[in-house]
């Protein structure tokens, strides 16, 4: 794959690929045409491929930097597809800096850019775009479900599906084109075309089922957006603090305390949940508070789930402008109120903690309702969803264009395949690469 990255692709790159320092061990990765020569200059004769070997690591002036393991991966059987070397040294800042400094003195050898190792892996055909994204997600994963989804993508589960669909589209087009070529002849079996359209009808429904999982994929990857809303002093900020188990938001008895939208990330049985606290909703002329309320309503409109709070005895708001999802009603401050005639989904007290466990259960229930038939071959990014939507639209157009001639219908199928190819990077994606790789850390 050619990209605007080509001019410097011949450089040998290096970076600290392990985490923050100090640490027990630091892994420095070197990749590129000169990787072996550079490594040999600092470690002496290189060990056999993939055999960890203890070496003294020196500057070219003969000063010892450290002793550590050296591992050699000849391309193409390496992460990047190029010759790669890993040098494992003690994870001290001065040790690592000394080695990186030494590496920087070699000709055409430089520190890697963000995600440059992965970008080379992509360019050398070691991974496709979905796998690269999966790898970025795997590194960022904080919850068990994020990890499982990312691993599915990184391991090629999703790519396999998209490639199989793209191949079906290509085969169908080939059959249609063959039929076009022989259209003048007498005995063309009309049934070939029928078979194609039957299969495309199946593909349409598979694509549409798959696309229906995109919301769940995005929820798993980005977290379920749960927004706490309600009138001033309902106890919204107190609830967020209680669920976060720390004092994130300011709590006072003054109505209108919260103005900005705040959030915390929770891990609910392996699912990421992003919980938002918002300004109390009421009519007001106060400029700052009005802005807070405007932001609160925008956040609600974008929610996956709203927790509508009201102090026990008050009616919780059930409808919010621009929001059509699920609302859970919470009666608050149960420690100072006896029962009430109003029904709430759950009664809570942020001061005593009563009801928080039940709220937890309701959130867990909501997540499992969303993930009923959970296969993790789910699209997880807006980019996937958009391109799948395009592909589906093109298949639908092909199916609906029965009166328009086979060449028009074949063209729709070509577009459908192209959209799938853009997801995996089979088809021109240069414009996407910078965005995707900027998410990576250096050394990956
Ligand atoms: N007794 C009792 N008091 C509570 C509870 N939760 C909140 N409060 C009190 O209610 C008052 C308002 O709480 P906040 O959490 O600031 O309410 P809020 O909904 O965030 O208010 P605004 O940000 O102004 O909209 C504070 O004095 C809290 O101490 C509770 O569970 N029990
Ligand atoms: K308050
Ligand atoms: Mg508040």
Image: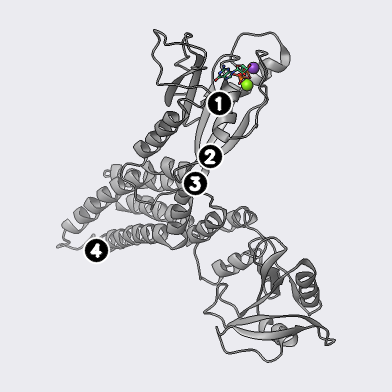
Q: Nearer the viewer, residue 394 or 250?
A: 250
Q: CA distance from mark 2 to mark 1?
A: 13 Å
Q: CA distance from mark 4 to mark 1?
A: 71 Å
Residues at marks 4 and 2 touching, judged by CB atoms closer than 8 Å: no
For marks 2 and 1 on the same chain, the one whose residue lies earlier in the sequence? 1
Secondary structure at numbered mark 3:
helix
Secondary structure at numbered mark 1:
helix
Q: Residues within 10 Å of mark 3 (few under 14, many from 20)?
A: many
Q: Which residue corresponds to the image point at 57% horizontal and 83% vertical from the top-left?
A: 74
For marks 2 and 3 on the same chain, the one whose residue lies earlier in the sequence? 3
Label of residue 239 in the image: 1
Q: Residues within 10 Å of mark 2 (few under 14, many from 20)?
A: some
Q: Percent x, y for residue 174? A: 31, 63
Q: Percent x, y for residue 170? A: 35, 61
Looking at the image, can residue 302 be seen?
no
Label of residue 422 in the image: none
Q: Residues within 10 Å of mark 1 (few under 14, many from 20)?
A: many
Q: Nearer the viewer, mark 4 or mark 1?
A: 1
* Residue identified by numbered label 3: 221
Label of residue 182 in the image: 4
């Amino acid at each position: 794959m050619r990209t605007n990255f080509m001019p410097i692709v011949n450089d040998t790159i290096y970076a600290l690929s392990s985490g923050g320092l100090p640490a027990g061990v630091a892994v420095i990765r070197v990749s590129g045409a000169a990787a072996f020569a550079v490594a040999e200059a600092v470690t002496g004769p290189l060990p056999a491929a993939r055999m960890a070997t203890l070496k003294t690591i020196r500057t070219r002036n003969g000063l010892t930097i450290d002793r550590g393991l050296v591992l050699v991966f000849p391309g193409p059987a390496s992460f990047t597809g190029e010759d790669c070397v890993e040098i494992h040294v003690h994870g001290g800042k001065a040790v690592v800096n000394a080695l990186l400094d030494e590496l920087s003195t070699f000709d055409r050898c430089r520190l890697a850019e963000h995600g440059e190792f992965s970008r080379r892996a992509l360019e050398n055909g070691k991974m496709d775009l979905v796998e690269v994204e999966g790898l970025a997600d795997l590194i960022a994963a904080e919850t068990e479900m994020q990890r499982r989804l990312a691993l599915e993508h990184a391991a090629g589960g999703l790519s396999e599906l998209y490639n199989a669909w793209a191949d079906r589209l290509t085969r169908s087009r080939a059959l249609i084109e063959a039929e076009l070529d022989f259209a003048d002849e007498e005995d063309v079996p009309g049934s070939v075309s029928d078979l194609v359209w039957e299969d495309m009808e199946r593909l349409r429904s598979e694509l549409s089922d798959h696309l229906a999982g995109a919301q769940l994929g995005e929820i798993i990857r980005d977290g379920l957006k749960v927004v706490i809303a309600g009138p001033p002093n309902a106890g919204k900020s107190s609830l967020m603090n209680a669920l976060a188990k720390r004092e994130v938001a300011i709590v006072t008895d003054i109505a209108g305390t919260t103005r900005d939208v705040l959030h915390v990330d929770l891990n609910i049985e392996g699912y990421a949940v992003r919980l938002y606290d918002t300004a109390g909703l009421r009519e007001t002329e106060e400029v700052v508070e009005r802005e807070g309320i405007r932001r609160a309503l925008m956040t609600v409109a974008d929610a996956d789930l709203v927790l509508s709070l009201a102090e026990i005895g008050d009616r919780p708001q059930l409808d919010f402008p621009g929001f059509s999802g699920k609302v859970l009603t919470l009666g608050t401050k149960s420690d100072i109120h006896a029962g009430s005639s109003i029904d709430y989904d759950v009664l809570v007290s942020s001061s005593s903690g009563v009801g928080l466990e039940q709220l937890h259960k309701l959130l867990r229930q909501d997540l499992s309702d969303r993930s009923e038939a959970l296969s993790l071959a789910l699209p997880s990014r807006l980019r996937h969803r958009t391109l799948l939507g395009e592909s589906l639209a093109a298949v639908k157009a092909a199916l609906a264009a029965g009166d328009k001639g086979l060449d028009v219908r074949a063209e729709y199928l070509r577009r459908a395949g192209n959209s799938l190819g853009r997801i995996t990077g089979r088809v021109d994606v240069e414009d996407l690469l910078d965005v995707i790789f900027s998410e990576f850390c250096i050394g990956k």
